[in-house]
Amino acid sequence: MRIISFCADGIREAAKKGFYDWVIDQDADFICVQNLKAQEYDLQSDVFWPQGYNPYFFDAVDKDLNGVAIYCREMPKAIMTGLGFVDFDMEGRYIQADFQNISIGCLLAPSAAKEDNAAKNRKKHFFDLFQNHLSKVRNKRREFVICGNWNMTHNQNDLQDFQSNQNVPGCSPEEQQWMDHTMTELGYVDAFREVNSDNDEFTWWPEGKQGENGWRVDLQIVSSGLKSAIEYGAIYKNQQFSNHAPLIMDYDYEM
């Protein structure tokens, strides 16, 4: 099972840069896309509806912000839009495809600027709610893959310039503690780190230029039952479709 996750920061611009041409050649079972900055009715061109996939979208109320999509080769049993966090759900931040024994989620977490205390508190509130959600669903008799732009790093190996960025939103001690709790206490797994421990692997460049001030914020977090199924992980950097690079993960799992 191959899952590709990509934060587009505007799917129409990413498409012009060749994202769909590239991703269709990857033979993925799921393509999870975040931050579309467009609503479903805006995407009428065939390029956004590739053959062989069942596409599902969850729009933000503001059509120029956020929005997530998931492309599935197999028809899911159900699609869940939102997490039941009313204010955040209006922002088009989460969509999930449910199958017999596995669920694939596509997440766009809130971000916060260094100077904006209200946004930082709001982001913290989202992740407190989300951690409660992760705690509840781990007791279900199914596996979970939640992939997307988490807008936070786990530790200093996920930052190209840790000294300059420590304590800023996205890599604060509180956020790293949140990640630690999710991995240790709740038993979730950072799939990419299971197969790649290099400290020079990044998925996001805030200034837009690869090789400068890289962060690893695009993750696939999986339930503990999938840990042994993780086979391969790679960050695709040969072409730049947005400030984020696509994350490719392969799992030894039959749908």
Image: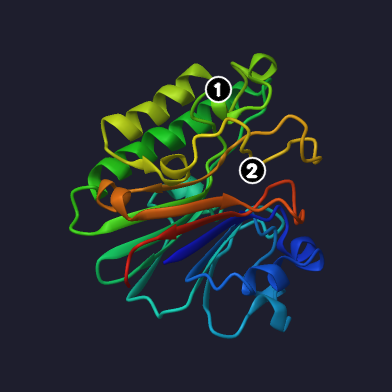
Q: Residue at 23% of width from left, 59% of height from top? A: 142
Instruction: Give the percent coordinates (x, y) of residue 164.
Output: 70, 16
The foreground one among 225 and 6 is: 225
Q: Residues within 10 Å of mark 1 (few under 14, many from 20)?
A: some
Type of amino acid at the residue the image marks with label 1: Gln
Q: Residue at 27% of width from left, 46% of height from top? A: 224
Q: Residues within 10 Å of mark 2 (few under 14, many from 20)?
A: many
**Quadrant housing residue 229:** bottom left
Instruction: Give the percent coordinates (x, y) of residue 201.
Output: 61, 38
Question: Which residue has dot 1 on it?
Answer: 156
Question: Is residue 23 placed above or below 156 in the rendered structure?
Answer: below
The foreground one among 210 and 164 is: 210
Res 44 seen here: no
Type of amino acid at the residue the image marks with label 2: Thr
Secondary structure found at label 1: helix
Locate residue 139 relative to residue 240 in the image: left or right.
left
Q: Which mark is residue 203?
A: 2
Locate residue 191 relative to residue 53 in the image: left or right.
left
Q: Give the mark nearest the N terminus, 1 or 2.
A: 1
Which quadrant: the C terminus?
A: bottom left
Res 87 seen here: yes
Q: Residue at 32% of width from left, 76% of height from top? A: 77
Instruction: Give the percent coordinates (x, y) of residue 135.
Output: 26, 41
Question: Is residue 129 placed above or below 42 in the rendered structure?
Answer: above
